[in-house]
Image: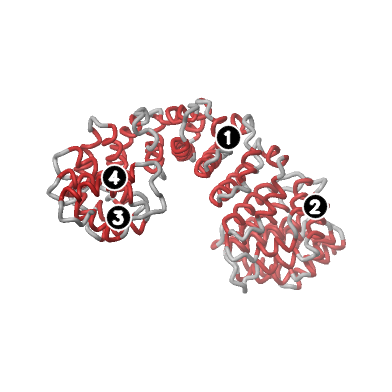
Amino acid sequence: MLSSLDDCVVEAGVRALKMVYRSPEAPKAHRLTADALQRLVVLLSSDNRSVAEVAARVLARCCDSPEQKMMVAEAGGLEGLLRLMATGELPRKEAAVDALATLTSGSDDISRRVADSAHVTSQLLPLLKSPSARVRFLAACCLTNLAPALPSTSSAPSQSEEEVRRAVLPVLAKLLGEVEVWEEVPHVLSRLLADNPQLQAAAADADAVSKLASFLRCDDCSQRLKEGTLRALSTLCADREASRRQLIDAEAMGAIVRALDDTSPQVRLAACGCVRAMSRSAKSLRASLVEHDVAAPLFRNLNDADRDVRIIASATLCNLVLDFSPVKQAVLSAGCIPALAALAASPDAELRLNAVWALQNLVYTAPAEVRAAVCNALSWRAVVDLTNDMQTEVQERALNMLRNQCANLPDRDAAKLVDMLLNWSGGELSGLLIARSDPAASHPVSHRVQALYTLCNIAGAGEENSRDGMMAAGLGPHLGRLLAEGGEEVRLAAVWAVINLTSADDARPGAAKRVAALREAGVSAVLANLSQQSEDLGIDLRERLKTALDNFVAHDMFTE
């Protein structure tokens, strides 16, 4: 019908398509062919104004995939829509802006093409003052999509990215009160505010947090509105304590936690993001998450059918298990350790990373029973696999978890915990750490540093047998090489290991034996040589070198 020579038939065909795509029952899986899309683009230039307008409205509804959007762009659709927008008639302008908003959404390439068109922002900005809420919304949506592609400074005829964002913000804030469009406004607001702290502060000052929170308290809040609201609140609260406080004062936390169990995966995902944003503040945790028992629904989301929900739920746990978190005990009681251990074996790299990151945070300053529970849930072989993971960030988090397991140990439990860790590893822990900090290997410097500080912690807290085991594994020559060849960070960690192995107040025979072995490995000579180059070293390393050398001198006095 669209290719008919009869204008009446063409108009009937395009109107039929419009009705189909406006229907909630429209077939989502069905997509127009390339020929049909090209024909719609041609109709944008029709002499029949009604046909051109309806063709634009169909394009606004049918192009939901990157491939379709690019087909329209390659067929000249962007130019056709820009010409249609330049007409003086509001219905045609609205239809053109609607289609441009759809085509530029999620497409950096198309956004750049449109942004490069002369006068596009000067045509869109006046529409922000239209008496029609729908037109104001579409213009705001289109400008939000174009903003990242705009220049950072004004250059006629274009406005800068920041100028456009600041022009759009108050319009969107007011549109939150317009029933006609408020279901979509929070989605656009979230995109507008992303990675822009100044604009986020301005939005909070415009009472955006309380307006959004009021949607969540409504019994008839649709899932689309709920999702957008949660996303916008996540953006506003991610880095602003003041916005988190506003959200708590708006009494919306109960609705946010309930949204973790929503039937829509998009809502659950957005709710997890909101909880994650709130979890970044200890104050907010005390005031809200504990009160609303977030642990149970969040743990259910770890096993969600939707991968994205599982990923953000596991990422949220990274904050909730930090030592300062008042919700940490609730998370532990909900069974987080075995759940995280299981996720650490996931074939999904992001889930593995989040699980190991959470375990790393969990054991930091944890009591002995929590550290032991992690060892019981996570086998040594699983840890070895994580330190050899294909993702270097997973490797580093696994090493950091081992470091935290051995760090900040309570005095009464320190030696016992170190023995437990050595037994857990079947005696392989020291060897693995030495291998991971080997300067001859290709491991990143950050990995070497993590491994070295773990060795430091073992040397500082373990009994004689654990220190002797480290020396037997070749730690002495290893430290000598690191001190001779390493950079500042590596040398500092290596010197700390020497200090812990040669404690000046340790007069036991084992200590003298270790000092002799370190001296024989050339460690004391390298330390002395480094101290001669002190002007080229950082102050912390210079001070630690002095302490290490003093330890050797003290042991010489013991043996005289």
Instruction: Indicate which disc, 3 or 4, sits on the residue closer to the N terminus.
Output: 4
Identify the secondary structure beneath mark 1.
helix
Instruction: Indicate which disc, 3 or 1, sits on the residue closer to the N terminus.
Output: 3
Circle 1 residues within 10 Å: few <14, some 14–19, many ≥20: many
Percent x, y for residue 476?
74, 69
Left or right: 531 in relation to 131: right
Distance, label 4 to label 1, CA atoms, is 39 Å
From the image, tell me which residue sits under label 2: 417
Left or right: 109 in relation to 27: left
From the image, tell me which residue sits under label 3: 110
- The amino acid type found where label 2 is placed reads Leu
Q: Quadrant of residue 495?
A: bottom right
Distance, label 3 to label 1, CA atoms, is 37 Å
Distance, label 3 to label 4, CA atoms, is 23 Å
Residue 312 visible somewhere in the drawing: yes
Percent x, y for residue 303?
63, 48
Distance, label 1 to label 2, CA atoms, is 37 Å
The residue that appears at 74% across and 68% down in the rendered structure is 431
Residue 548 visible somewhere in the drawing: no
In this rendering, the answer to whether 87 lies above or below 439 is above
- Image quarter (top left, top right, bottom left or bottom right) of the C terminus: bottom right
Percent x, y for residue 388?
64, 66
| Marks 3, 4: nearer the viewer | 4
Left or right: 86 in relation to 138: left
From the image, tell me which residue sits under label 4: 18
Circle 4 residues within 10 Å: few <14, some 14–19, many ≥20: many
- The amino acid type found where label 1 is placed reads Val
The residue that appears at 22% across and 58% down in the rendered structure is 76
